[in-house]
Image (cartoon, coloured by chain):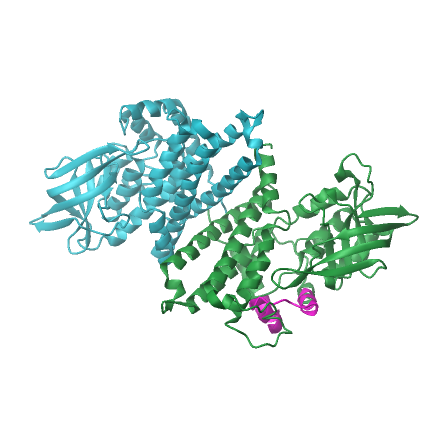
Chain colours: A green, B cyan
């Protein structure tokens, strides 16, 4: 048993650190550190910088432009990015669609779409959830009907993250409404966001942010070439795609960074004239979540090392999702508590590049409540924590 | 980075499992408890023959120079089988103090299971601080005279010799034969059947070991080793309680279906499985760091584990009894024994509050 990084892992970490120190643009780091919203240009600029280094699609197979990093190395990269205030590349194109195209797409689709994913020039969003299909995703109703060499799509998708920036959307659609099981009549198809009949409407979340959207499809015609894999096999591809979320699912990097921020915040806030971090009650709250994170860091690494060896880690990734989201939410909650009264002024866009108002309280105070509210989502998206518990109990208890 | 036990460690577990499966099942444990026997010489000797007493001791004293991950492996099995023998108090805690104070000549008798020591630091009214000393030692020629009261000293009921901390111009350590004049032992079994005693010293003669006034670091290091060992012991108990509960949820039927098919129970079981992985991870770290030369690194790792495992094992006890329903309340069903094992481990060598505070302040 040995908890230390190997010499080559330490060298890798130093390489990542040097790269981030040299290449991360200041304006982007400032927004990330201040927990503001990055604009489209900032997202794409950073994606381009990573692509130029060959690091935008690290987990892809080597022949498609992956880096060959081990899961542990990827986790090191992830942690260092958070520690430096570097944005994480959005998962939709790189982590979700890319592997599906590589495994199930046609050669034409790979040639057409993979380069734009790799360099970040094409912005993809995800069209899975619908108003009536959340945790029960297979009950989705958006239809695609074959008409010559086109499909005609009608229906509505929702919770489309950053769809307002997107050039493309990858969708699950129902192609066989009469299939014996709902999962068997679903296909995976790619749609241009500027196609006639596609309409996008913002959803403003309770933190005041515009991150998610509704996307409506009215007689949208899509070339049949944009169907991925076989018709009615889309559910298999979606399951494959969701499995790829395993690495990084515990959110160790973000939580470590947020914990450090919480400690800095608690050191700068006062209670009875003393730093809040000296208050025994608040100190114990921090210690509890810090210990939980320390344990999860090890649990996560145990899973990564097992994955590296090709051992099936079983339901551990669902466990990591559950506990990782609980820990992150607890830290955000404590940052809001630590901010006290100055968590209350409504300043949802503080910290954005385009925001020029005079700040009330500190920036960390101002962001604490919007971020607390916004991150209630992390125990809901990607399969809610209750769905994760059901996945585990199915595997372990058989029910 | 490697989270596996070594081949040697796996073999040690196997031989320990084999021996205990043969000689120490749940019914044997219950019979021993009914007799209020906290120590069974035959079992003790068979454990010594397996080499687990010698294992953590230095080679120079007839030991195998084992590390604390080896200790973890052994203690997990002892917890799993509810073995009440005074292993941690003697081989992990007292033996380390003898080693650290230069009494290495005494270790060989521990390695072969011949002599048993127990170490008393904690005092009534002082709760969990091992350095709060009300016991005094006054010099009297070559010897010291000890007066004071040590609370719930693990293993003291069956020990041949006691190691006592006392104030002799600062924390100091003394060796006292258990049957010495001026030593009164009030012996009792703990909740789970392990043995302990309150030790009252009234002018008892003790031999100083180590240097007078400088024992604080040794005491803290010794307590950390014992705390890490009890974390591992709890892991063994938790694994058994977990398996019993999982099996019960699959087989117990009510309203015509297995109760595990009720989501309210299934999800609670899953939460316990998550807790188990977290406990195991942090117990592993405590084992790896329990002997770290850097005291702050050692204390943070051990306190993180003791605090996390203390709180999570309390939850385990409550939840596994609740999910079993009435059967979980009975003495003849093994679950309760595991719950009591966890409770004892939770409170010895610093409870959750103590370690949470120490983690936050280190």
Q: Total number of numbered labels?
A: 0
Q: Nearer the viewer, residue A48 or A332?
A: A332
Q: List x then y, in percent, for residue A209.
A: 64, 64
Q: Quadrant of the C terminus of chain B?
A: bottom left
Q: List x then y, in percent, for residue A99.
A: 72, 50
- Residue drawn at x 46%, y 40% is B6
- Residue drawn at x 56%, y 77% is A358
Q: Is residue B310 left or right of residue A81?
A: left
Q: Nearer the viewer, residue A118 or B14?
A: A118
**Residue B312 seen from this side:** yes
Whether residue A98 is in magenta: the answer is no
- Residue drawn at x 42%, y 47% is B308
- Residue drawn at x 25%, y 46% is B97
The dominant secondary structure in magenta is helix
Q: Is residue A224 left or right of residue B132?
A: right
Q: Nearer the viewer, residue A158 or A225?
A: A158
What residue occupies the far right of the structure in this picture? A148
Q: Is residue B38 left or right of residue A302?
A: left
Quadrant of res A24: bottom right
Q: Is residue A175 left or right of residue B100?
A: right
**Residue B158 seen from this side:** no
Taking A243 as reference, is B84 above or below it? above
**Segment colored magenta:** A19-47
Q: Nearer the viewer, residue B8 or B163?
A: B163
Whether residue A34 is in magenta: the answer is yes
Q: List x then y, in percent, for residue B162.
A: 20, 40
């Amino acid at each position: 048993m040995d908890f230390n990084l190997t010499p080559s892992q330490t060298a890798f970490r130093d390489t990542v650190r040097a790269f981030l120190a040299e290449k991360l643009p200041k304006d982007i780091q400032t927004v990330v550190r201040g927990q503001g919203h990055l604009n489209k240009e900032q997202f794409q600029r950073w994606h381009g910088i990573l692509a130029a280094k060959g690091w935008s699609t690290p987990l892809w197979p080597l022949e498609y432009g992956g880096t060959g990093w081990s899961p542990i190395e990827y986790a090191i990269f992830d942690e260092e990015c958070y520690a430096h205030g570097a944005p994480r590349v959005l998962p939709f194109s790189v982590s979700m669609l890319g592997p599906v195209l590589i495994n199930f797409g046609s050669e034409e689709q790979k040639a057409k779409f993979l380069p734009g994913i790799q360099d970040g020039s094409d912005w993809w969003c995800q069209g899975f959830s619908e108003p009536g299909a959340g945790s029960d995703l297979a009950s989705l109703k958006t239809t695609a009907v074959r008409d010559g060499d086109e499909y005609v799509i009608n229906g509505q998708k929702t919770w489309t993250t950053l769809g307002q920036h997107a050039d493309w959307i990858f969708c699950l659609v129902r192609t066989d409404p009469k299939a014996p099981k709902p999962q068997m009549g679903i296909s995976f198809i790619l749609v241009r966001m500027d196609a006639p009949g596609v309409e996008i409407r913002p959803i403003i979340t309770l933190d005041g942010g515009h991150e998610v959207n509704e996307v409506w499809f009215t007689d949208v015609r899509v070339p049949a070439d944009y169907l991925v894999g076989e018709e009615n096999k889309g559910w298999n591809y979606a399951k494959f795609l969701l499995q790829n979320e395993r690495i990084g699912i515990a959110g160790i990097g973000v939580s470590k960074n947020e914990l450090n921020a919480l400690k800095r915040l608690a050191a700068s806030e006062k209670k009875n004239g003393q730093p809040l971090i000296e208050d025994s009650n608040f100190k114990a709250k921090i210690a509890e979540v810090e210990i939980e994170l320390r344990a999860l860091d090890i649990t996560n690494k145990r899973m990564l090392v097992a994955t590296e060896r090709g051992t099936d880690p079983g339901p551990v990734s669902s466990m990591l999702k559950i506990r990782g989201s609980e820990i992150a939410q607890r830290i955000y909650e404590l940052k809001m508590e630590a901010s006290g009264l100055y968590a209350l002024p409504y300043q949802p866009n503080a910290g954005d590049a385009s925001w020029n108002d005079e700040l009330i309280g500190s920036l960390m105070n101002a962001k604490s409540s919007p971020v607390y509210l916004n991150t209630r989502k992390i125990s809901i998206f990607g399969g809610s924590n209750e769905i994760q518990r059901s996945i585990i109990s199915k595997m372990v208890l058989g029910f | 980075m490697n989270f596996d036990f070594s081949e040697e460690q796996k073999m040690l577990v196997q031989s320990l499992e084999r021996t205990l499966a043969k000689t120490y099942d749940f019914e044997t444990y219950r019979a021993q408890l009914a007799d209020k026997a906290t120590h069974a010489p035959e079992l003790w000797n068979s454990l010594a023959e397996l080499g687990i007493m010698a294992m953590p001791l230095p080679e120079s004293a007839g030991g195998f120079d084992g590390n604390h991950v080896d200790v973890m492996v052994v203690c997990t099995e002892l917890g799993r089988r509810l073995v009440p023998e005074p292993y941690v108090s003697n081989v992990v805690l007292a033996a380390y103090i003898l080693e650290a104070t230069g009494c290495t000549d005494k270790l060989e008798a521990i390695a072969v299971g011949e002599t048993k020591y127990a170490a008393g630091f904690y005092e009534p009214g002082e709760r969990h601080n091992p350095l709060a000393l009300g016991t005094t030692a006054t010099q009297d020629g070559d010897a010291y005279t000890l007066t004071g009261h040590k609370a719930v000293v693990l293993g003291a009921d069956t020990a041949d010799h006691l190691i006592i901390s006392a104030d002799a111009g600062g924390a100091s350590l003394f060796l006292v034969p258990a049957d010495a004049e001026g030593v009164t032992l009030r012996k009792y079994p703990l909740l789970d059947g392990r043995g302990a005693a309150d030790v009252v010293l009234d002018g008892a003669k003790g031999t100083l070991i180590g240097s007078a006034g400088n024992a604080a670091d040794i005491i803290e290091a010794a307590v950390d080793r014992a705390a890490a060992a009890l974390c591992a012991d709890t892991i063994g108990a938790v694994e058994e309680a977990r398996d019993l509960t999982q099996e019960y949820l699959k087989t117990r039927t009510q309203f015509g279906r297995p109760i595990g098919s009720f989501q309210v129970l299934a999800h609670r079981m899953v939460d316990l499985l998550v807790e188990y992985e977290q406990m195991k991870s942090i117990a592993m770290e405590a084992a790896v760091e329990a002997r770290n030369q850097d005291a702050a690194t050692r204390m943070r790792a051990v306190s993180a584990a003791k605090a996390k495992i203390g709180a999570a094992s309390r939850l385990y006890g409550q939840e596994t009894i609740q999910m079993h329903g009435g059967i979980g309340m009975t003495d003849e069903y093994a679950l309760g024994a595991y719950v009591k094992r966890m409770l004892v481990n939770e409170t010895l060598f610093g409870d959750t509050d103590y370690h949470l505070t120490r983690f936050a302040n280190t």
